[in-house]
Amino acid sequence: MSNQDEKQSVPSYLACAKPNPAENRAPWYKNIAPTYAGVFLWFVFWSGAASSGAGDAPGGIFSQGWLVPLLGVALGGLICYVLFYHVFGRFGQRTGLPLYIVGASTFGATGGLIMPGFLMGLLQFGWIAVNCAGAAAALNVWLKLDPSSVGYYAIIIVWGVLSVIMALKGIKYVALISTYLPLIPAAILLYLLFKTVGGLGSFDAAALVAAAGKGTAAAAPEAATAPSAFSTWAILALLVTYIVGFTATAGAAGCDFGTNARHKKDVVWGGLVGVFGAITLTAGIAVLIVAGFYGTEAGKAMIASGEVVLDPIKLIGKIMGNESAGGVTAFLLALCAFPSCCFSALIAATSIKTTLPKVNPWVSCGIGCAVALILALTGVAAKLPVIFGFFGASFGPICGAMVAEYLLGKGRWTGPRAGFNPAGWIAWVVGFAIGAEPQLVDWGVLPCAKIPLSLIWAFFAGAIIYALLYKCQSRILPYPQAENQAE
């Protein structure tokens, strides 16, 4: 078969794909690790990790001390590296092709446009919503507006609209400064740790639980209905689920990042430092900051008054001993988050343009931005466990199916399959149902108990079902780019 015939047998987006050549690749410390580190230095991630479950039980994740949440953070980081990054980095490194191309083997040449391609683009509007809500909350530490005021809503709207405009018209200017902006949250984290580390030895988990429980019990009709503190297992499960939900889409994007890797060692070290290391350090330091603060005299005074706040962003002023300085620090953290909002909009625009080339990106991104703003304005985007749970449910089974594809193919990419590959789609439907089960319970759709670690089970459901259906797949299309793969 001639090359022309081969190109005609696959969709144009596949035929036009070109592997990233070896001369364009660089060491892991110049691309993969710093890119991922920038993702996890985003304050929404590490502040959300420390305050996970704060509204569900007295003391939140600190009810058993600070060593247990540190273990949960490290466990979440390790799971993300092993299950949600390594294989994707290797796929990208071996093929030189991005995720939406490599995914055509799992979901089919036609289906790959939707999954993971179009879905990745749609979920970026969810990230824009989270960014808008988080940035507004951080800015409000400085501005101190009423969260239901017009001014507060205006911040959210301007933030979201401006990010889409910059993504479509001025992303090169954002990229010029985004390389150095992560140094600011890194410095802030280290400074806050320096201010609070002396209190770790005096941290009293029981006192924190008792203080947090006062308000809960008082608000409850009967003391017996007040929620109890989290167990060790519940803390570990909560943190793993939170971290996996946040990381699932970024881990799958490791396929794109892996196209810049020269060899396997770049993939491994880029992930160990940028994924496992960055997750453990950023979220781990946030945990230590909160625990250390409540071991200081200022923190003990808050406990004595019955006031417990587990979000490090809201504690910055008290940690620094100056509310004005805390407001400026929170402002800087919000400012550093703006480039990531722009890049989310750019990824969304690129994905939609690839899958729907006839749709004007200003129209598609405008609609997506409107949805994102609705999520932010209504407060839905501020419910991080719910949002990250949905992200993880969406991409967990995708990751599981593609990992199964990698293992069954003995590390080689098979190339795109015709049409909609049934194995991948069935694996995703079942895995998504399992991953989204806790959200469906919360929304009253299902009357049963929540599945613990549902996102992990969603991953394994996708992997197992795909493996069981491996012999029942659509045919592999001729594709020259799949023939020459690196080791």
Image (cartoon, rainbow, N blue to C red):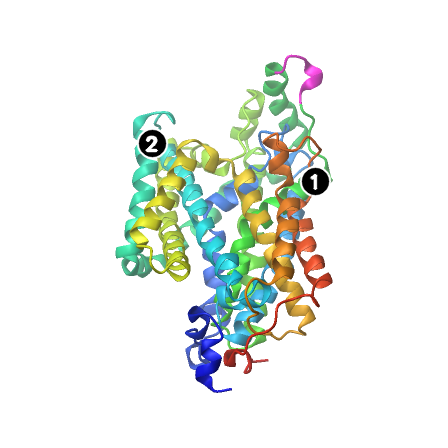
Q: Find disc 1 in the rendering and name its residue.
A: 451
Q: Is residue 7 left or right of residue 432?
A: left
The local crowd at label 1, few if under 14, some if 14 to 19, many if 20 or more residues have their Cα within 10 Å, is some
Residue 202 seen in this snapshot: no
Residue contact between numbered discs 2 and 1, judged by CB atoms under 8 Å: no
Report helix, strand or loop for mark 1: loop
Q: Write the residue at 68% across / 61% down.
A: 466
Which residue is nearer to you in this view: 36 or 472? 472
Occupied quadrant, residue 419: bottom right
Query: Mark number for residue 134?
Result: none
Which residue is nearer to you in this view: 382 or 192? 382
**Among the two numbered marks 2 and 1 on one chain, the one whose residue lies closer to the N terminus:** 2
Q: Write the residue at 40% across / 62% down.
A: 354
Q: Is residue 77 magenta?
A: no
- x, y (%) of residue 437? 64, 40
Q: Say how many tags the image has.
A: 2
Nearer the observer: mark 2 or 1; the answer is 1
